[in-house]
Image (tube, helix red, strand yellow):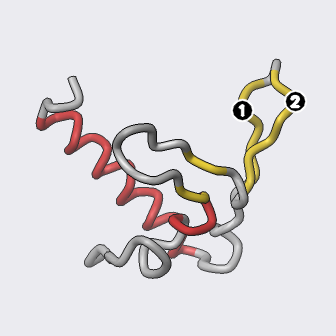
């Protein structure tokens, strides 16, 4: 499934929509704080680690929440 071109198109669109939302109010929409599920007491934040497994080194959410800085360096034309 992960090699299906539609999978990449779908996730690229989700990424673009998140980027548009973040840039609609740059200071307010970069905050990241969420619950994993209603049954789990742990919350996620910009300091949470995303485990990448064998694909790459693990990353911290705060390092990739901004597409123009940190590990990422891209922008969308609006």
Residue 2 versus residue 8 in the image, above or below: above
User: Which quarter of the picture shows residue 25?
Assistant: bottom right
Horizontal side of residue 27 vs 12, given as left or right: right
Measured as percent of width and height from the top left, residue 1 is found at 21, 23
Q: Is residue 63 placed above or below 55 in the rendered structure?
A: below
Residue at the (82%, 18%) spot, across then down: 39
Residue 49 is labelled as: none
Q: Where, by quadrant of the figure, is residue 41 drawn?
A: top right
Residue displayed at 69% across by 57% down: 32
Of the pair 38 and 21, the residue shown nearer to us: 38
Residue position marked by numbered label 1 in the rendering: 36
**Label 2's element?**
strand
Among the 4 quarters of the image, the one containing residue 62 = bottom right
Q: Which residue is mark 2?
A: 41
Q: Is residue 9 above or below residue 22?
A: above
Q: Say whether residue 30 is left or right of residue 77.
A: right
In percent of width and height, residue 3 lies at 15, 32
Task: Assess disc 2: are there few (<14), some (14-19) or many (≥20) residues with their C-alpha within 10 Å of its C-alpha.
Answer: few
Q: Nearer the viewer, residue 48 or 53?
A: 53
Label 1 vs 2, first from the N-terminus = 1
Residue situated in front as seen by the camera: 49 or 31? 49
Residue 34 in the image, given as x and y percentages of width and height: 74, 44
Residue lying at the far left in this picture: please name it. 5
How many numbered circles does the render carry?
Answer: 2
Q: CA distance from mark 1 to mark 2?
A: 8 Å
Q: Quadrant of the C terminus?
A: bottom left
């Amino acid at each position: 499934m992960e090699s299906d071109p539609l999978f990449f198109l779908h996730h690229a669109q989700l990424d673009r929509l998140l980027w548009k939302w973040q840039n609609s109010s740059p200071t307010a929409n970069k905050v990241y704080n969420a619950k994993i599920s209603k049954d789990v007491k742990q919350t996620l934040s910009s300091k949470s680690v995303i485990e990448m497994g064998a694909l790459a080194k693990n990353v911290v959410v705060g390092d990739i929440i901004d597409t123009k800085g940190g590990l990422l360096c891209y922008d969308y034309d609006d």
